[in-house]
Image: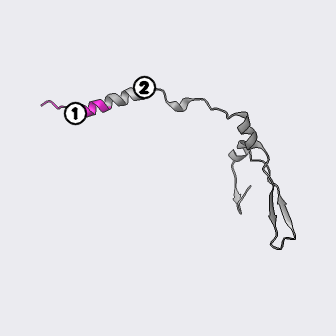
């Protein structure tokens, strides 16, 4: 007895083989952003000010630059919310 293969299955196999022959789009090289964007990300952040409830004192907190990727890629131990 001869088995009939459904046409929809054959179309699915054909489309699968056809599409799998295309190169993947994830193989594109890494692209760097424009220099203007890099300058904005690397710029120092503006200081933050906090005024006391009585208005007598003002705290001026300055933040450091963003951490580098090599620093973030290092193994770490977490202790009380700090990176050691």
Q: Residue furthest left?
A: 1
Residue 21, disc: 2
- Across and down, in percent, residue 18 comes to 38, 26
Secondary element type, mark 2: loop
**Which residues fall within the magenta stretch?**
1-12
Q: Which residue is located at x 40 percent, y 29 percent?
A: 19
For numbered disc 1, what is the local secondary structure?
Answer: loop
Q: Mark 1 — residue?
A: 6
Q: Residue 41, position in %: x, y?
A: 73, 43
Give the residue displayed 87% in from the left and 68% down from the top: 57
Identify which residue, 67 or 49, lies in the foreground: 49
Q: Residue at x 71, y 38 (%)?
A: 37
Q: Local crowd at mark 1 within 10 Å, few (<14), some, or many (≥20)?
A: few
From what the image shows, is residue 83 above or below residue 51? above
Q: Earlier in the sequence, mark 1 or mark 2?
A: 1
Asked if the stretch drawn in magenta spans residue 4, the answer is yes
Work out whether residue 49 or residue 73 is closer to the camera in this orientation and state it: 49
Quarter residue 62 falls in: bottom right
Return the residue found at the far right.
Answer: 56
Against 12, residue 42 (above or below) is: below
For the C terminus, the quadrant is bottom right
**Residue occupying image coordinates x 69% and y 33%:** 34
């Amino acid at each position: 007895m001869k088995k009939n293969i459904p046409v929809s299955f054959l179309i699915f196999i054909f489309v699968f083989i056809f599409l799998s022959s295309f190169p993947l789009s994830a193989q594109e090289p890494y692209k760097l952003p424009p220099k203007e964007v890099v300058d904005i990300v690397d710029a120092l952040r503006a200081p933050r000010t906090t005024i006391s409830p009585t208005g007598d004192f003002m705290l001026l907190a300055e933040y450091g630059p963003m951490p580098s990727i090599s620093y973030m890629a290092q193994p770490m131990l977490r202790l009380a919310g700090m990176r050691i």
